[in-house]
Amino acid sequence: MKKGLLALLVVASTSHAAIDLKANEQPLPVTVDPQAVAKIPANYKFVESGTLTVAISALNSPPLALLASDNRTRIGSDPDIARLLAGSLGLKLKLVPTAWEDWPLGISSGRYDVALVNIAVTEQRKQKFDFATYRVDNLAFSVKSTSEVQSINSAADLSGKKVIVGSGTNQERILLGWNEENKTAGREPALPVYLTDDASGNLYIQSGRADVFFGPQSVSAYKEALTGKTRVVGLGPKKAYVATTTKKGNELVYALQAALDGAIQRGDYQKVLARWGEQGEAVAQSEVNPPGITY
């Protein structure tokens, strides 16, 4: 994050919003929601008594998650949603920065109560986890601002290109599926480039070591507005939902759903998305285990 940067313009889905990073370091007020509290399972044991332990991304991926100006505090839309959940349930909040590869085992083994790592609902994940939706999952293709690529809408548009994706993500599965289409059509497949940090991704795109970044649309829009060195040239082909993620069957998901729905009704949820430029990804209500992406 650049010091001294107080505001920037972010294009998020169909909306424009000024993001004031300094102001966004201040937590939004949260109201305890008795209806949500009542849905906490009587036999559920939190990782720490009286505390909601939430796994969030350890990477700097604004506006989803990033470090505040103290280089220690985690801010972003996912940490703000976590504060909404904990506050609505009358609990303290503990945020645990977590690598993408680690959240499934962390939830399964009971290290975290909830994971908020921009996790999309898939049919495969629903076999092991329960989900309460809180955002529409838009994916986007972005390229260097001076790239000759003007649009990416199909498998053929990625033929022969080096594409940055995260391992185990929906975008990786989409890319691999498009590679099969390219092979069947006799076209050269794309080359997946697996990186684990945002700084490396920026370097790869700007140096030409990669042609395309394929990831969350809000992240791509933020980068484009922040530096002007990249631009979005297309959206992913599948629509999904980002959701709170909990261990399957422990029924905490219903308390989280109630907390989200209460926050939506009070307008607290909309304030979170608005201050991070994600209004275009809002849901009207939270759904438990909706139909997920299949591959």
Image (cartoon, rainbow, N blue to C red):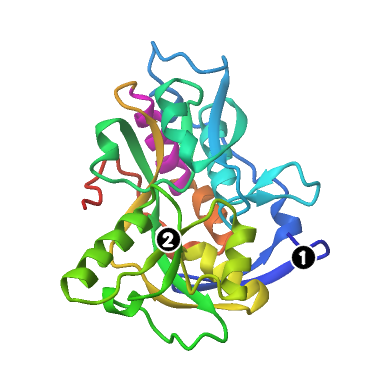
Q: Would you say residue 1 sits in the magenta stretch?
A: no
- Name of the residue lying farthest toward the left: 184
Image coords of residue 71 (percent x, y) = 77, 47
Pointer 2: what residue?
Answer: 281
Tell me where the magenta segment starts and ends, as one range: 251-264
Image coords of residue 225 (percent x, y) = 61, 75
Q: Residue at x 27, y 37 (%)?
A: 126
Characterize the magenta stretch by its predominant secondary structure.
Answer: helix
Q: Amino acid at mark 2?
A: Glu
> What crowding class fits label 1: few (fewer than 14 Cα within 10 Å), some (14-19), or many (20 or more)?
few
User: Is residue 195 depicted above or below 217 in this figure?
Assistant: above
In the rendered image, the quadrant that contains the N terminus is bottom right
Q: Is residue 121 or residue 35 the one in the foreground?
A: 121
Q: Is residue 161 left or right of residue 122?
A: right
Pointer 1: what residue?
Answer: 6
Q: Which mark is residue 151?
A: none
- Name of the residue lying farthest toward the top: 43
What is the CA distance from the residue labelled 1 to the residue labelled 2?
24 Å
> What crowding class fits label 2: few (fewer than 14 Cα within 10 Å), some (14-19), or many (20 or more)?
many
Q: Is residue 115 left or right of residue 98?
A: left
